[in-house]
Amino acid sequence: MIQRIQSIYLLLVVLLSAVGAFLLPLWYKEDGSAVLALDQLTTLAFFGVSAVLALITIFLFKNRKLQFVLGRLNIILNFILLGFFVYWSQALPGEMQISEKGIGMLTPVLSIVFLVLANKAIKKDEALVKSADRLR
């Protein structure tokens, strides 16, 4: 049952977290150079944990309750990462003169959207299984 829609959503989270950390710039310095998640150890760790957690969640399709809990944990993790980005965007030196953020700061938002969609589909599957159990 790995071909469910929540597996696609979770795979998108894995791709966003893993590829986004290496390719998408978080912000640009005053000299125009991009700052990636590789340059910030904490963001790299959060992106890595989010990708691994989503990958593990894909293969827990037999235990939907644990899959749902890990999805919520991943949502909380992405909210923490988003909080770091908001703090850093406000605390960057020279922020009042230059406000050039990168697209990488949106990856936690997109990840949260896909995780919510995956959890909604997991909950729908659980309700379907419970309704089928009542008919027996």
Image (spheres, rainbow, N blue to C red):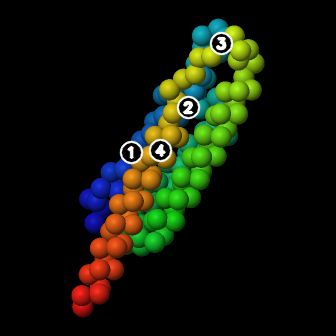
User: Residue 31, which numbered label?
Assistant: none
Q: Secondary structure at mark 2?
A: helix
> Label 1 amino acid?
Leu
Q: Are marks 2 and 1 in contact (CB under 8 Å)?
A: no
As measured in the structure, the alpha-carbon distance from the residue carrying label 2 to the one carrying label 3 is: 16 Å
Which quarter of the figure is the N terminus placed in? bottom left
Kindly report the distance in space between the C-alpha atoms of the residues bearing marks 2 and 4: 11 Å
**What residue did someone put label 3 on?**
98
Q: Which residue is mark 1?
A: 12
Secondary structure of the residue carrying tag 1 is helix
Q: Is residue 132 left or right of residue 110?
A: left
Res. 73 image quadrant: bottom right
Q: Residue furthest left?
A: 135
Return the residue at label 4.
111
Image side of residue 92 versus residue 102, left or right: right
47 or 9, which is in the foreground? Answer: 9
